[in-house]
Amino acid sequence: MKILVVGGGGREHTLVWKISQSPLVKEIYCAPGNPGIASLARCVPIDAGDIKGLTALARQERMDLTVVGPEVPLVEGLGDLLAAEGLPVFGPQKAAAALEGSKIFTKDLMRRLQVPTAVYETFADFDAALAYARGQKYPLVVKAEGLAAGKGVIITADFAEAEAALRSIMLDKVFGSAGNRVVVEEFLKWEEASMLAFTDGETVVPMISSQDHKAVYDGDQGPNTGGMGAYAPAPVLTADLLQEAMERVMEPVVHGLRDMGIPYRGVLYAGLMLMEEGPKVLEFNVRFGDPETQAVLPLMQTDMVPVMQEVARGSLKGLTLDWYAGSCACVVMASGGYPGSYPKGLPITGLEAAGALEQVSVFHAGTALQEGDIVTAGGRVLGVTARGDDLQDALKRAYRAVDLIHFPDAHFRRDIGQKALK
Ligand code: AMP
Ligand code: GLY
């Protein structure tokens, strides 16, 4: 088979790595890819947002499957363009990708299907939103409706902060048209976990649970990032809770969409707050999580390629996934300054020594090749990942690898996975 993976971050490096282990695969392309991916796939310089260019590539090269990593091309309709050409695609079409592309669509769907989620109201009018915010309990969560590169959620401590957030989103349009409408919702505070599942629009097959670390500093301090590390499985999401989330969240949403004539084919990610009364949905993503993927896929024993083919064909029924025992941990090494501004082009050393450690994989997220050397090129630079007999063992191996890698002003959290060990 010939497979195209769309994207060029740590998640996509992990997808390519897993796909490359399948005996069914002859050739992997990745657009645009990165220097880590280039050792496993042919990288083509087409941006992940260029849905026409990607479709042309898939057509020309007669891809047997296109696997879409990031949300933007899905929300913009890459799945629809590929399907219209009869090209198999792993990733939902535009109508289903609204689960991530429109927070209002999603909240209203959950309300109708009685899927547990934070109490909320939606607004297109600034004054109405402000009046609502005035009467609420704090903290209060203000969310831009559309895609905002993970920055569209603002947790406000009091009315003044809520007003400022609404003003910047709805009037100053800091997220552009993504802020034409907002969701204002109740703040939920409990432990968060991520649930990923394969679905063909009918059958839902869950993967093992995982947990991200969104804040930039140890102890969950500082601003939110795309994710500073992850581990799997996450013991907080017990087998019982996973089952409850399947029955109360994943299946109702997938079947609710089906009943609207919208087949969801791809991976569905639910960000869950595990409340005393059961799991509540914080958000859906229509793709693999980053960095959750780095922690989950190394534990998957099953060949993922036939699974993705069954998803694309709509024939997932009866499929089961096998997992390795033990745990996996991913520590993200980021550029100093991230999630604010940071320098680029700094040389990275120690990659080979770290990657040679047993059960360790160093996934590239924001790297570039400069005169033959690997340099930093993004906020999140590397996802240093290790499998172990248990979480403690996985963390020990991952941090041993981190200690071998150097670039100026590198920042990483030292407490990845600690919550699960307490
Ligand atoms: P989202 O962009 O919707 O994924 O939200 C990003 C992050 O904001 C989530 O992973 C949570 O950590 C936090 N968050 C979102 N909604 C809420 C909420 N209602 N209560 C508390 N935290 C939230
Ligand atoms: N790790 C959070 C996300 O992928 O959205």
Image (cartoon, rainbow, N blue to C red):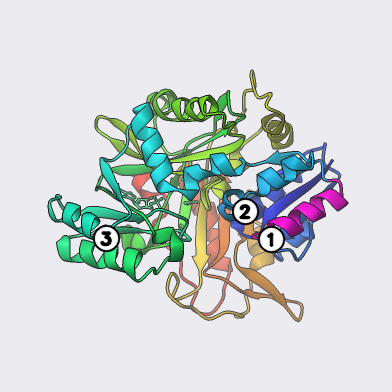
Report the Cα–Cα distance between label 2 and label 3.
30 Å
Q: Which residue is mark 3?
A: 126
Q: In the displayed structure, would residue 68 be above or below residue 348?
A: above
Closer to us: 373 or 105:
105
Disc 2 is placed on an element classified as helix
Residue 285 visible somewhere in the drawing: no
The percent position of residue 280, horizontal first and vertical second, equals 33, 36
Is residue 63 toward the left or the right of residue 192 in the image? Answer: right
Which of the pair 259/280 is nearer the observer? 259
Circle 3 packing at 10 Å, graded few (<14), some (14-19), many (20+), is some
Q: Earlier in the sequence, mark 2 or mark 3?
A: 2
Q: Badge 1: how crowded within 10 Å, few (<14), some, or many (20+)?
A: some
In this rendering, the label closer to the viewer, 3 or 1: 3
Look at the image and say whether residue 204 sits in the magenta stretch: no
Residue 288, image x, y percentages? 56, 45
Q: How many marks on residues? A: 3
> Mark 1 sits on what residue?
50
**Residue type at the position of mark 3:** Phe
Of pointers 3 and 1, the one earlier in the residue sequence: 1
> Viewer-proximal residue, 381 or 391?
381
Q: Secondary structure at mark 1?
A: loop
Question: Measured along the vertical axis of the image, is residue 339 above or below residue 162?
Answer: below
* Res 321 quadrant in image: top right
Which residue is tagged 2? Answer: 73
- Spatial CA span between label 3 and label 1: 33 Å
* Tag 1: amino acid: Asp
